[in-house]
Image (cartoon, rainbow, N blue to C red):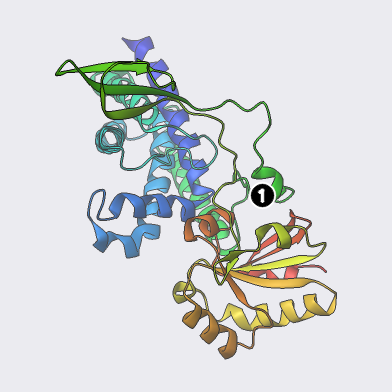
Amino acid sequence: MKYLVWISRILVGVLFIISGLIKLNDPVGFSFKLEEYFSPGVLDLPFLEPIALAISIFVVIVEVILGVLLLIGFKPKFTVWSLLAMIVFFTFLTFYSAYFNKVTDCGCFGDAVKLTPWESFTKDVILLVLILILFYGQKYITPLFNTKTNWIVGGVALLACILFANHVLNHLPSVDFRPYKIGANIEEGMTVPEDAPEPIYEYAWRFKVNGEGQIYVTNGDYPSVDGEFVDVETTLIQKGYEPPIHDFTIEKEGQDFAFELLNEDKLVMVIAYDLAKSNYEAFSEVAEVTAKAKEKGYKVIGMSASNDALANKVEQQYNLPFDFYFTDETTLKTIVRSNPAVLVLERGTIKQKVHYNDVDELTF
């Protein structure tokens, strides 16, 4: 039992620290995932949506600290009980998402590792078993250091988490795992290779033959049956290739200008996924920077999911030297974790991407 507890202790502690740090690198992204869970179609807790970011930061810091405390063996009873409560809750959440197909990605490892709902549930079940081993073998969880040193290690870990969270919130994630990272070409990210695997479907054809209902299963071909066709049920057996970038459009009056704009030699995108939630103080500096970019020959556009009335109001109020185009809100949230933010592209390749606090660092 002693060795089993040690193995579980290391596995659980390391996994919680890694998972927590990945999400702590991008707490805004994790808050978007929490908003999905809080939405009416899932847990129906809309009153928590306004504080999703605060909950996100709290949860990921707790996750990292519990991993650290477990590895150093400090406060084992508190640590194990906390881990058990957390994993029971997350196991319920991932099962609910998988069974009812509510949220397709739990966000357990941010954008670094994508898990299907059932993969997430399986991972949580394994963690639950390991934590139960720790629960029943608490007496074997001994501290690595003396009490004073343990307090120092725990305190340093907590302070480091707070400082790191503050940094990424006021700038951008230190490591960008998304397909819109600097150096990525958006058009290439939307391309499907010629040899990409196609999705595989199974078709259950229902016919009435001699007055009796019969089902014929095929991989797509219409069955040769001497009877009356009733209906067909389609089941996805294997997903095909999905490009890392999809649902990307830059629309104006119902027309998509994405292909044209992504082929600009010099393009500046000002992204504000929701103008009603933007940091308006930043638009004054954005106006100055984009005016400078236009003088240097850059094409400048805005991209938002807000309506034209609000976009026009913001343009006029802050003397923005560009027009806003429409892009899906989820896509804009994926591109950059700042509202607003500025991107500089050359023929579709992202050269610079900055938070509104770092607009002065742009170079043209």
Residue at the image point whose x is 41% and y is 16% from the top: 7
* Residue 95 appears left or right of 314: left
Mark 1 surroundings: few (<14), some (14-19) or many (≥20) residues within 10 A: some
In this view, 313 is above or below 101: below
Tally of numbered discs: 1
Residue at the image point whose x is 14% and y is 18% from the top: 211
**Quarter of the rendering occupied by the C terminus:** bottom right
Where is residue 200 shown, x and y percent of the image?
47, 24
Dot 1: element: loop
Where is residue 274 shown, x and y percent of the image?
47, 69
Q: Residue furthest right?
A: 296
| Residue 138 visible to an observer of this rendering | no
Which residue does the numbered mark 1 point to in the structure image? 181
In this view, 14 is above or below 153: above
Where is residue 341 shown, x and y percent of the image?
61, 67
**Quarter of the rendering occupied by the N terminus:** top left
Where is residue 21 shown, x and y percent of the image?
51, 42
Decide which of 299, 212 is in the foreground and name it: 212
In this view, 273 is above or below 156: below
Decide which of 94, 242 is in the foreground and name it: 242
In this view, 302 is above or below 167: below
| Residue 174 visible to an observer of this rendering | yes
Specify the amino acid type for callout 1. Lys
* Residue 240 appears left or right of 61: right
Residue at the image point whose x is 74% and y is 55% from the top: 348
The picture quadrant where one finds residue 134 is top left
Decide which of 355, 206 is in the foreground and name it: 206
